[in-house]
Structure formats: structure tokens, C-alpha cells
Image: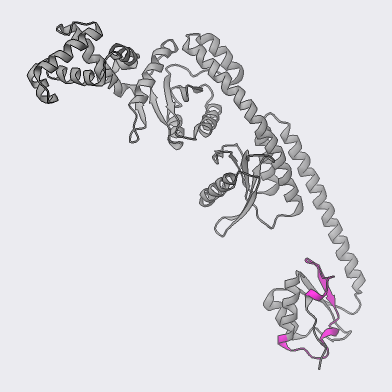
Amino acid sequence: MGPQLRPARSHPWLEPGGLLLTDGVQFGERVSPRRAQAYVARLVDRGVVALGFAVRIVHDRVPEVLVTACERIGLPLLEIGPHTPFMQIIRSVSDAVAADRQVRLERSLAAQRAVARAALRPDGLAAVLRELERNLGTWVALFDSGGSRVRVPTHRSVPTELEQVVIRAARDLLAAGRPAGARLSDEGAGPVTLQTLGQRGRPLGVLAVGVGAGLDRAGTDLITSVIALASIAVEQSRALGQARRQLRSGAMELLRSGSVDAASRTVAQVWGELPGEPIRVATVAPSDGSTDALLAALELLADEHEGQLFFAENDGGITVVVGPSGQRDVRTALRTYGAHAGFSSPTRWSGFEEATAQARSALRRSTAKQPFVDFESVAATGLLGHLEATGADQVARTLLAPLDDESLTTLRIWLEHNGSWDPTAKALGVHRHTVRARIDAAGVLLGMDLNTFAARAEVWNALQLVG
């Protein structure tokens, strides 16, 4: 009976990634195909990457069954001549491994230095991410705390077929509410690694990189460094962003008060010129939970279209001022985030206050089917549309405030029937004297003589304005 083949797991010195050298003494004079196949399979399972077989010591040549087993499993097989000492091979491999480690170390240090230098640039976060994608040769994507893509100007794009998968994975990580990482594997688009940003509390965002488990130590260390830098940058960006948002709101207040020159000087110091005339003012109502993401998208648009867009938060909404060439992109961004908006007619800066009123009026006409409304369509409704645009609805509410719902309903139906008692009584299902009593009481409460055309016209317009 030939020598027994001991399982590879009984040899703790067999480390993954190694080259195993043998003279084949364990096989004896003959080895069956089955035993050779099992031997090679155990080596591969242990992580051996190649097998070196010395000839003319025990065997004159490499057994054919071993050659066949290696070819079948895909394990490289090297034939070692009788004049090549194992120690010489071991030293050569050791020197090559050491040289490779040195190259990797130098490359890693160079990459770390490049990332550190990038972090000092004015566009630090974007520069760091570009440096990461350059060193890894792949795409990089950043997501904010709400799971929306942060449009950082990097050089590579997420593969189209993988984009939605990455977005869902990033949002799943954020939903967990704690620091976490994940790896994806998609045969059509390659592997992906995701990691949350921030070390304490709720994650600040997610970094996604187009690499997987095969990444070497240098690449892993580089990603770890970038995550730390990105976490700091995002945290700082939050504080800076809050200050910028407050400054925007202050500049918008200057515009509302008519101080266009003062606002223009303030804005020019931070963002550049205000949009050129003619401008449109938009009053925007963001969808639930999308305000931060929409503001980030508008910030990017403002950078891309300098001098064509200015915006600020106000009263739970957003006011956007857009120049002639920026309207299409603004509407696209608003549509992406499910916002409703009303747009004023084109105007000059001197008409900013009236344009704001027009935008608010148009916004009130928006619906799920028609999320964007231009004031031109509101104005087409006639004089009432103009009155609503100038804030007359608030005056109307004040005028009608003394009346209860019953009185308002009676007044509306009475005026719809041109002040006729009998048709009104029939429509309300009450006696004509009841109608007269209600109208007289309403006139007293309003301090108006409802027998006159002027009073009736004023009340009718007020009823139309309040809806």
C-alpha cells in the first residue's frame, strides 16, 4: 500500500497565496488519477497558487496524472530541473514578494500624499474623490444623508445599468442609522463597495466605489483615508452650508425690500452676479423630506449656470430667481425632486415684489397633475387673477371674516342668482324671508348696503378670491 496523502488542512505551514515545492516522494512510484485529482483539489482549497515539481530525484518526470489534474483544476504546474535548488527558488520568490511589497508601499504612500494634497484645495471634497478614482481606476459616487446623489464633479460615471442598484443599497445603509458597509456583485457591471460616512450617530452620507473584495491592502487603506477625509468635509460642509443658506435668505430679504444694489453686492462676494434681466421668480413648495436634496441640486445648478440662478429658503418653501437661459434646468431639477412651483411673468428687478406675488398666486393653482404653473395662465383668467396675484385674497378674507359659513353660502348663492329671493330660497331649501333675513344680517356685519351694485360686486369678488 502506497503512502497516505494527508489532508492539506493538517499542514498549518501552507499559507494562502504560496508556491508549494515538492519532489513527489508522497506519491511513491505510482499514483492513480483519483488520488492526484484529490491532492490538487486540496492544495487549491488551501489557497496554494502554484505547484513546483522537482524531477530526477524521486520521479524522472512529472506524472501525467498530476499534469492532467492541474490542467483540469487550473493550478499552474512548474517542472524544476535537478540542478535548481529549492532554496534558490525560495530566495527568488521571497525577493520578488519583498520588491512587490515595496512597490505597493511606495504606491500607497504616494496615493495617500496625493489625497492629502487634494484635501487642501478649495474644492477639497471633489478633488479627494477625483484622486481616489484616478488611483483605483474606477468610478466614485457620493450620497447625502437623505440618500440623494451628491453631484460632485468627478471624471467617471456610475454605469447606467448599475446606478439604481447602488442608490437602493446606499439608502438601505442609511436607513440602518449606524456606521456600516456593504459589497455588491453584479455580473453585468462589476463589483461595488459602499461605506457610510461619519463615525458617531446618524451617518452623514455614503461613499460608493466601483471595486469589490479583490481590492489590495493599499487600495483598502486609501479608501479608508478618503472616507475619513470625506466625513470631515461633509461635516464642515454642513456647517458652512447652513451659514450660506442663512446668507442667501438675508440677501433675498434685501431683494424683497427693494435694496437690489445692496443684495447684488452681497451675492457677488460669494456666488457671483445675480441673474440678468428679464428674470422670472418662482415660489417652490418641496415635496416632503426633499428640501435638503433639492437645495443641493439648486446649489450645483447655480455653480454651473453662474449669473442665471439665485435662490433662498423662506417660510418653509424656496424662492428661486432665474434668468432667461436657466429655466429649463431649474424645472428639470424641481421635477426630479417632486416639487410644486409657481412662476411669475418675465420682469425687471424693479418689479421683484410684484413678481413674487405672481409666483405665489401661480403656486396656489398647482396640482398633482400640473405641478408647475406660469402666471401667464393665471392672468388669462381675467381681473380676478390679477387681484389674486397682488395679494387681494388676504384683503378678501379680512372683509368676509365677520360672516359664518351659513352666511357665506347664502351670500354666494344669492349673488349667483343675481340677488333674486325666490331662486335663492329654492336652491337653499329655505323660505324667501329666511334668505332676506340672512342677507340683511350679513350687510350689517359687513357694514355694507347690499342693495347697491358696488357692494354686491365687492362681496362677489371677495367670495371668488377666497374660493
Instruction: Look at the picture and state if 113 lies above or below 376.
Output: below
Count the labels in the image.
Answer: 0
- Which residue: 51% across, 49% down? 164
Snapshot quadrant of residue 355? top left
Q: In this view, does 83 lie to the left or right of 204?
A: right
Q: Is residue 301 magenta?
A: no
Q: Closest to the observer: 322 or 145?
A: 145
For the N terminus, give its image quadrant.
Answer: bottom right
Q: Residue furthest left?
A: 422
- Which residue: 29% across, 13% down? 402
Magenta extent: 9-34
Residue 49 in picture, x, y percent from top left: 76, 69
Snapshot quadrant of residue 69? bottom right
- Which residue: 51% across, 14% down? 253
Q: In this view, does 314 lie to the left or right of 30?
A: left
Q: Does the magenta stretch include residue 11?
A: yes
